[in-house]
Amino acid sequence: MKEVNYVTSGTCSRMIHVELDDNNIVQNVQFVGGCHGNTQGISALVKGQKAEDIIQRVRGIKCGARPTSCPDQLSFALEQAIQQ
């Protein structure tokens, strides 16, 4: 099992806790802060998915005028977890 606590930047969420199995399948994602309903939804949608696929889908998503978003930050958290 790979686990990472990723400190976000540029979003309302402050941290993302990610757990991947040895095949890089998402077992759990928890956001600290952010829009609770949206972050719960993201967490539910990515569970059981390959981290690499999620990264490709959400990398570069912006939140309004911000250059990043919670999904974009999740891609960086997943990338960090894969590298462990």
Image (cartoon, rainbow, N blue to C red):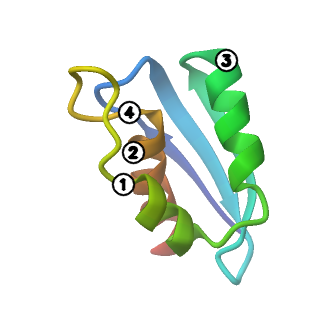
**Where does label 4 land, which residue?**
69
Q: Residue at the spot x=39%, y=34% of the render?
A: 8
Q: Earlier in the sequence, mark 2 or mark 3?
A: 3
- Which amino acid, mark 1? Arg
Is there CB contact under 8 Å for labels 1 and 2?
Answer: yes
In the picture of the structure, the residue carrying the numbered disc 2 is 72
Q: Amino acid at mark 2?
A: Asp
Which comes sooner in the sequence, label 1 or label 2?
Answer: 1
Say which residue appears at 61% left-offset and 31% top-offset: 31
Along the polypeptide, which appears first: circle 3 or circle 1? 3
Say which label, 4 or 3, has the lower sequence index. Answer: 3
Indicate which disc residue 36 carries.
3
Mark 2 Cα-neighbour bin, 10 Å: few <14, some 14–19, many ≥20: many
Query: Viewer-proximal residue, 45 or 18?
Result: 45
Q: Is residue 71 left or right of residue 44?
A: left
Instruction: Measure the C-alpha gap from mark 4 to mark 2.
Output: 5 Å
**Are dots 4 and 3 in contact, CB under 8 Å?**
no
Residue indicated by mark 1:
59
Q: Nearer the viewer, residue 65 or 2?
A: 65
In contact (CB < 8 Å): disc 4 and disc 2: yes
Q: Amino acid at mark 3?
A: His
**Whether residue 50 is situated above or below residue 45 in the rendered picture:** below
Q: What secondary structure is found at the residue carrying circle 3? A: helix
Q: Which image quadrant is residue 12 in?
A: top left
Task: Indicate which disc, 4 or 1, sits on the residue closer to the N terminus.
Answer: 1
Provide the secondary structure element on which disc 4 rests.
Answer: loop
Q: CA distance from mark 1 to mark 2?
A: 5 Å
